[in-house]
Image (cartoon, grey):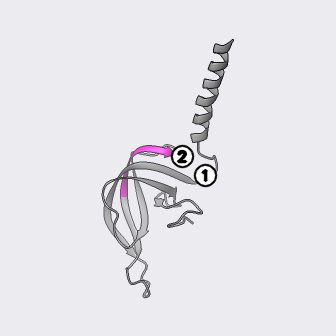
Amino acid sequence: MRASHSVILMGTLFFGAAAAKEPAADSPYIEVSGRLENLFDYESTNDPDDLLGHGWMTARFHVTRVLRGPRLPRVITVRYFGHAFLQDRKTRLTLRRGDDGVYLVCVPAGSTGIQCP
């Protein structure tokens, strides 16, 4: 009798933890890890008050693992906003798919950083 309670408890913990990792069905965000490869494509905002010269940059992202969200192709195009190119290295990003199929590098609502539209 005691063994069956242990099995039930272990099953509940295991499946409960797996369910907690599933993203919300309506979440537009995808969390991935992989390697960024800059394309050195820079689109300035042309803001005369911006001393650092912020703009949009385009890169390829080589997806090694989707941590949250739907499955993605191995290589996707991403755009991010900043005043300098991100380093070409392994990183973890939160993305949102744009209307044109390009993924925007962003932070979820309520966090500090670039908010996705």
Which amino acid type corresponds to the residue marked 2 in the rendered image?
Gly
Q: Horizontally, is 9 left or right of 100 in the view?
A: right
Where on the picture, by quarter, is residue 20?
Answer: top right
Q: Label 1: state its secondary structure.
A: loop
Q: Label 2: state its secondary structure.
A: loop
Residue 116 is marked as: none
Mark 2 / mark 1, whichever is N-terminal: 1
Residue 27 is marked as: 1
**Percent position of residue 52, x then y:** 37, 80
**Which secondary structure type mostly characterizes the magenta part of the structure?**
strand
Magenta stretch holds residue 96: no
Is 74 located above or below residue 10 in the figure? Answer: below
Q: Nearer the viewer, residue 17 or 103?
A: 17
Q: Horizontally, is 29 left or right of 40 in the view?
A: right
**In the current view of this chain or complex, which residue is farthest to the front?**
2
Q: Which residues are magenta?
A: 60-70
